[in-house]
Amino acid sequence: MGDGKKKSNDAFLEKLSLYQRYLAERDEVLRHKWLESERAGRDIGSERALMDWVLNHRAKWRKSRQAAGE
């Protein structure tokens, strides 16, 4: 009985961890959108910001978070 509860708790914590990572990544994309929009002098749009961030910044960002133990 205790083992089933532990698995349930582990699954919940993993989902929470994934959600926290999603929120952190989303915040970085929004920050990138703001910076690039300021640079362009207009709103570049969410899709463009997301694609640019994924293609040009995501790997380095994830590597730096991994190195920091997040």
Image (tube, rainbow, N blue to C red):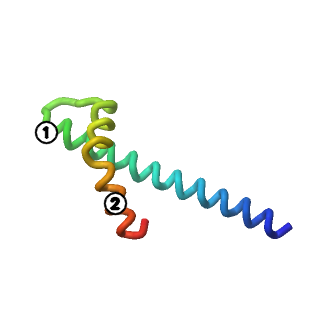
Looking at the image, do the residues carrying marks 2 and 1 touch, with CB atoms under 8 Å apart? no
Residue for point 44% across, 50% down: 23
Which label sits on residue 27? Answer: none
Q: Amino acid at mark 2?
A: Lys
> Residue 69: which quarter of the image?
bottom left
Residue 22: x, y in percent? 46, 49
Which label sits on residue 63? Answer: 2
Q: In the depicted view, which residue is nearer to us: 20 or 2?
A: 2
Q: Secondary structure at mark 1?
A: helix
Residue 16: x, y in percent? 57, 56
Residue 42: x, y in percent? 18, 30
How would you rate the neighbour count of disc 1 (Cα within 10 Å): few for under 14, some for 14-19, many for 20 or more? Answer: few
Q: Amino acid at mark 1?
A: Arg
The quadrant the N terminus occupies is bottom right
Residue 45: x, y in percent? 28, 30
The quadrant the C terminus occupies is bottom left
Q: In the depicted view, which residue is nearer to us: 33 or 4?
A: 4
Rendered position, 38 above or below 68: above
The reply, left or right, for residue 23 in relation to residue 6 is left
Q: Secondary structure at mark 2?
A: helix
Which of the two marks, 2 or 1, is nearer to us in this view? 2
Residue wearing tag 1: 39
> Residue 47: which quarter of the image?
top left
How would you rate the neighbour count of disc 2 (Cα within 10 Å): few for under 14, some for 14-19, many for 20 or more? Answer: few
Residue for point 24% across, 41% down: 34
Residue for point 32% across, 52% down: 59
Q: Mark 2 vs mark 1: which is more N-terminal?
A: 1
> Residue 51: which quarter of the image?
top left
Residue for point 29% across, 42% down: 53
- In this figure, what is the number of numbered marks? 2
